[in-house]
Amino acid sequence: MTFPVQIRPTDAVRELVELTQKAAQNLSFIRDEDIQIGTTPKEAVYHEDNIILYHYTPSVKKPFKIPVLIVYALVNRPYMVDLQESRSLVRNLLAEGIDVYLVDWGYPQKGDRWLTIDDHVNGYINSCVDFIRQKHKLKAINLLSICQGGTLSLCYTALHPKKVKNLITMVAPVDFHTSDGMLNLWSGCTHGPSSMDVDQMVDALGNIPGDFMNFGYLMLKPFQLNVEKYLGMADILDDEAKLINFLRMEKWIFDSPDQAGETFRQFLKDFYQANKLIKGEFKLGGQRVDLKKITMPVLNLYAEQDHLVPPASTIALEKYVGTDDYTVKSFPVGHIGMYVSGKVQKDLPPTIANWLKERA
């Protein structure tokens, strides 16, 4: 019989103190300006309320004629798609000859608590799409929608199909009643009435604090995301490049905008709890969102180890859209790995670019 190794409290305290001292010494040499994010050159070309539409500087002489608009989630900041030069979805798409725009949702203020999903879809997204269409003299553009932005873009495309040439969804939740996602279970969408009183939260708080949202995501994997990764940091304290990469990710993780109260209420109740999107019951601006009206080519990308948006939730899209040109592709990573995995960044941008060019 074997017995677990006994660790004396004094030894544990000593190791903890040594680790803290080592971390403090190494971190003291790193300045804020060392943690560069979103370095790909871009220009703000359109403003509306808190949102900014950016156009990235093309890196080839003649970029692909039909631009791509990236629609990111409302949660967290969109610079994840351009986190660092060596792992940048945006930079790699530009290298493939794609002309790239991105919606930056900004940081909702107190007065934005009344913004609805309709404001985001028929308002902001539509304004950005129209700006790009007019600038490039096109009837339709390409959408690349990510995570929650994928759900919003599905609604937009179903309501404005003539303005979307090709639709790409990436790690996007579609079926919110899959049983293998902790977010689904926590919101009460799979087993009876929800234990989360969304109405009470929004009525009391107005906008939902970003720190509250971030805490919830960290609790999906409490040990791995709160303990294990910081223990692993000890192994890279002597490697400045790796340490800066770690801090760059930490900066993104904790840069959490508040969520507009009414949008949060509607998203939780209509999607997570009632699953109205795939039931054909969701309405915006008085119109029913019918996914069967999505008849343009669709490329659906998902992460096989995704703990935020389970693969089953994303894969379900094929059953509900009306297109005859549907492609699905997976990558052997988690949700965040779709942006930061070096291997994925070698394969994902060419996959997107080639798929678009084949449908020119």
Image (cartoon, rainbow, N blue to C red):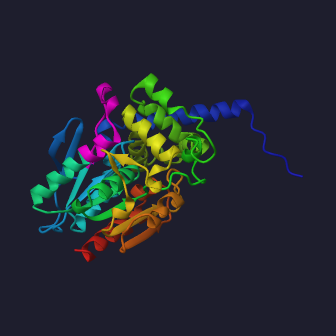
> Residue 39: in sight, yes or no?
no
Front residue of 16/102: it is: 102
Identify the residue at horizontal 60%, vertical 34% (top origin): 16
Relative side of 168 to 137, left or right: right
Does 178 sit above or below residue 267?
below
Residue 87 x/y as whole percent: 35, 57
Quadrant housing residue 189: top right
Find the residue positioned furthest to the top: 204
Identify the residue at horizontal 40%, vertical 72% (top origin): 327
Identify the residue at horizontal 49%, vertical 60% (top origin): 333
Queried whether the magenta region covers residue 107, the answer comes back as yes
Find the residue positioned furthest to the right: 1
Count of labels in the image:
0
Residue 128 x/y as whole percent: 20, 49
Magenta range is: 103-123
> Residue 158: in sight, yes or no?
yes
Front residue of 171/203: it is: 203
Q: Quadrant of the C terminus?
A: bottom left
Identify the residue at horizontal 36%, vertical 56% (top origin): 154
Relative side of 330 to 65, left or right: right
Queried whether the magenta region covers residue 290, the answer comes back as no
Residue 330 x/y as whole percent: 46, 67
Residue 250 x/y as whole percent: 43, 41
Relative side of 6 to 122, left or right: right
Find the residue positioned furthest to the bottom: 358
Front residue of 134/94: it is: 134
